[in-house]
Image (spheres, helix red, strand yellow):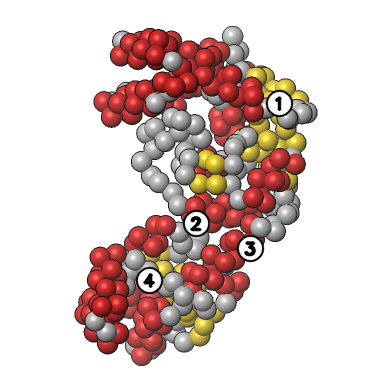
Amino acid sequence: MEDLKLEEILYNDKYIIIDVRSQGEYEEDHIPGAINLPILSDEERAEVGTVYKNVSQEKAKALGLRYSGPKLEEYYEKVLEFRMNHKEVCFYCFRGGMRSHSIAKVMELLGERVHVLEGGYKTYRSYVIEELGKFSDYSFNVIHGYTGSGKTVLLNRYKGNGRNVIDLEGLAKNRGSVFGDIGIDEKISQKKFDSLLLKELKLNRGAAIFVESESKRIGSVLIPDHVFEKMQEGRHFFLKTKMEDRIKIIRDDYLRDTNEKVLSEIRGKIEKLKKQLGNEKLDELLNKFDEANYDYVIEKLMVDYYDPWYEKSIVNYTFEKYIKFEEEMGLTR
């Protein structure tokens, strides 16, 4: 058994990386490409921790053995499978301690050569923070535009044409507005967002990257300081889109599926704009929404709420070029 450093296994196809932490730990964040085979479930881990704190270290170890023992067969079979495919196996837990070393030791006693990541996930997290704070082999082309102007649609077209694109809202699982989480059930942690962003930056290194203009916060996550500063320093473009296209884009984004759950969520979000819109406008919008006059509601929200707010936020930018959505998308009238 050999402890390996992070740089030896990261983005290296030679290794199969196995995360032995609980499912909850794994879902919060993990090394890109790692497979989750938890030695303890979230509930089992919590129980072992309680015993460790309130009873004794020995009792906690015994309980951990009781829960982990039946899972050893699956570990052995997986290691055999990966080794037959000429892959090296590397385990990691949070600090590269008991969980990963225990599994690795059992595999070693069964005659299988495996590895453990030195420092575990904690080392990886430190690496991500450090890299995001200094990584500079990239620059940004930032696309601005009113709500519904099709910035994400345009970026997807650019990506399909082979340009370097990072969809920040896609990584954040949020469209970056009051309605940003409508229809999106998956939540993402700051740690996972950082990991995904760093991976995208490295994949697109050495070239200008197209991104959508964002505030520092997207939903529940923050764009790291250094990356946000690089976006501010980038080249800025403004996407001009006709109102009829903006309405269609918003409708396709949020009202493609008009089931009761989605409609209830959207109505709830509109109600939260009472302070910004006033009672009279709010009541009108809610009535039109209940009548399924969605295009009217979309246009009024953009004209009365989103556009005035957005105009205040772009006064400090100088745009290199104004882009017409219909021309970039090849639309004809």
**Mark 3 crowdedness (10 Å alpha carbons): few <14, some 14-19, many ≥20:** few
Tell me if residue 255 can be seen: no
- Which sits earlier in the primary sequence, circle 4 or circle 2? 4
- Which sits earlier in the primary sequence, circle 1 or circle 3? 3
User: Judging from the image, what secondary structure is the residue with disc 3 in?
Assistant: helix
Residue that label 2 marks:
191
The alpha-carbon separation of the residues under discs 2 and 1 comes to: 32 Å
Asked if the residues shown at circle 1 and circle 4 are in contact, with their CB atoms under 8 angstroms apart, the answer is: no
- Which sits earlier in the primary sequence, circle 2 or circle 1? 2
Residue that label 3 marks:
130
Q: Position of residue 14 (x, y in %)?
A: 54, 71
The alpha-carbon separation of the residues under discs 3 and 4 comes to: 24 Å
Residue that label 1 marks:
315
The amino acid type of the residue labelled 2 equals Lys
Residue that label 4 marks:
20
The alpha-carbon separation of the residues under discs 2 and 3 comes to: 13 Å
Q: Judge left or right: residue 286 versus residue 133.
A: left
The alpha-carbon separation of the residues under discs 1 and 3 comes to: 33 Å
- Which sits earlier in the primary sequence, circle 1 or circle 4? 4
Asked if the residues shown at circle 3 and circle 4 are in contact, with their CB atoms under 8 angstroms apart, the answer is: no
Which of discs 1 and 3 lies nearer the camera? The answer is: 1
**Mark 4 crowdedness (10 Å alpha carbons): few <14, some 14-19, many ≥20:** many
